Amino acid sequence: MQEQLTAIDDSFVSEKDLIVGKDTRGYECSSSVLAERLTQVEVAMILEDHNNRDYSVIAEYLGKGFRGYHNMSPGELYSQFKEQEETFWRLFDDGELPYSEEDDPANQNN
């Protein structure tokens, strides 16, 4: 994936280096980490919908498009993640995330 840069005070910062906030478990989360966590939750939900033969979300994304989490501002990402954080941790704790993101600080202890 191409590195995303964000303009801050007349300079550019990699989204991997831009700490947006802490999650409920105390991990400092960058824009990149939040975008990947949200993507993991979304993929898990799409897979669950597929198992239930519900294709409405994927059909909407293909029909109308989806902006993409890596294209959101840090504030938007943090807000979106706070709405999905409980789901993320449930999937994480149950080992049900569709893939593991090595840059996520939550995976550093696993």
Image: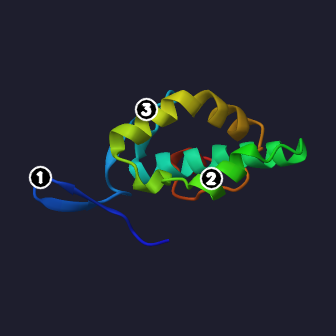
Residue at mark 2: 61
**Along the line of sight, which residue is nearer the eye, 105 or 90?**
90
Q: Label 3 sits on what residue type?
A: Ser
Q: Residue at x 70, y 56 (%)?
A: 99
Q: How far apart, in angstroms, are the residues tagged by discs 3 and 1?
A: 22 Å
Q: Residue at x 64, y 49 (%)?
A: 40
Residue 109 pos. (x, y %): 60, 47
Residue at mark 1: 9
Q: Quadrant of residue 6?
A: bottom left
Q: Earlier in the sequence, mark 1 or mark 2?
A: 1
Say what secondary structure mark 1 lies in. Answer: loop
Q: How far apart, in angstroms, are the residues tagged by discs 1 and 2?
A: 34 Å
Q: Earlier in the sequence, mark 2 or mark 3?
A: 2
Instruction: Look at the picture and state if 92 lies above or below 5.
Output: above
Q: Residue at x 81, y 43 (%)?
A: 49
Extreme residue toward the left, this view: 10
Give the label, 1 or 2, closer to the camera. Answer: 2
Residue at mark 3: 79
